[in-house]
Image (cartoon, helix red, strand yellow):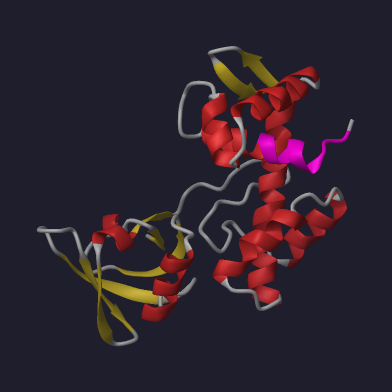
Amino acid sequence: MAQSFTEENYLKHIYKLSKKSDKGVSTNALAERLDTKASSVTDMIKKLAAKKLVNYQKYQGVTLTNKGQKIAVDIIRKHRLWEVFLLEHLGFGWDEVHEVAEELEHIKSATLVDRLDKFLGHPKYDPHGGPIPDSEGNFPAPARVKLDELEVGKQSKVMGITEHSESFLAYMKKVGLDLGVEFKLMERHDFDRSVEIELNGKPVQLSHDVAKNIFVAY
């Protein structure tokens, strides 16, 4: 039985929340994530449990079954591939791709998604640095670190970000730190963990709050 868009969204967010804890995902955490009532979440969880997509016990949270996890990872794969396509081939910006990909991720055709993956050259990460699983659900091994963890003196490039707010994206654009941009880490200040990078031959100062939200190659 096919899942509705809402059911797929639930599975996706249960998967993402489960990665932050070893315990089951609480209905309150899921309600906050989806900006809805806990009672509505409970009703949906029961529907998903009836389809054997989640395991649910009251007061113990919810976990995905193998079937539910497969669907969730597939949704994430589609979403991230579409983000790459939108950015690289349709001229969308970092701050625009997520919302459009939210709609495209529900396309059912596995053939279309596999061909999209091949067309894009089998990318490992989306524009925000999220790892893209392959058709078997395997995520790539990490080949990146946070900028605040990078070795001083090392040449690197921007791989993605963990902060997706409009203000952060606007700041990244203002200082010239776009996806794939190369730079050199010149100094890290012990006092506040701020960093100085060399970008296009010029020094750029970044606070620790900024540096800790940028993925870079290592």
Q: Position of residue 37 (x, y in %)?
A: 61, 32
Predominant secondary structure, magenta span: helix
Q: Identify the residue at horizontal 46%, vertical 28% (top origin).
A: 21
Q: How many marks?
A: 0
Residue 53 can be seen, yes or no: no
Q: Is residue 48 above or below residue 138?
A: above
Residue 135 visible in the picture: yes
Residue 5 sits in which quadrant? top right
Looking at the image, residue 75 lies above or below residue 174: above
- Residue positioned 68% across, 29% down in the render: 40
The magenta-colored residue range is: 2-11
Residue lying farthest to the left in this orientation: 191
Q: Is residue 39 left or right of residue 7?
A: left
Q: Is residue 148 above or below residue 93?
A: above
Q: Which residue appears at 84% of the width and 57% of the height?
A: 112
Q: Position of residue 64 (x, y in %)?
A: 65, 25
Q: Position of residue 31 (x, y in %)?
A: 58, 33
Quarter occupied by residue 54 = top right
The image shows residue 152 at horizontal and vertical percentages of: 21, 65
Is 6 part of what is drawn in magenta?
yes
Q: Quadrant of the N terminus?
A: top right
| Quadrant assignment for the C terminus | bottom left
- 75 drawn magenta: no
Q: Is residue 87 above or below residue 18?
A: below
Q: Residue furthest bottom?
A: 201
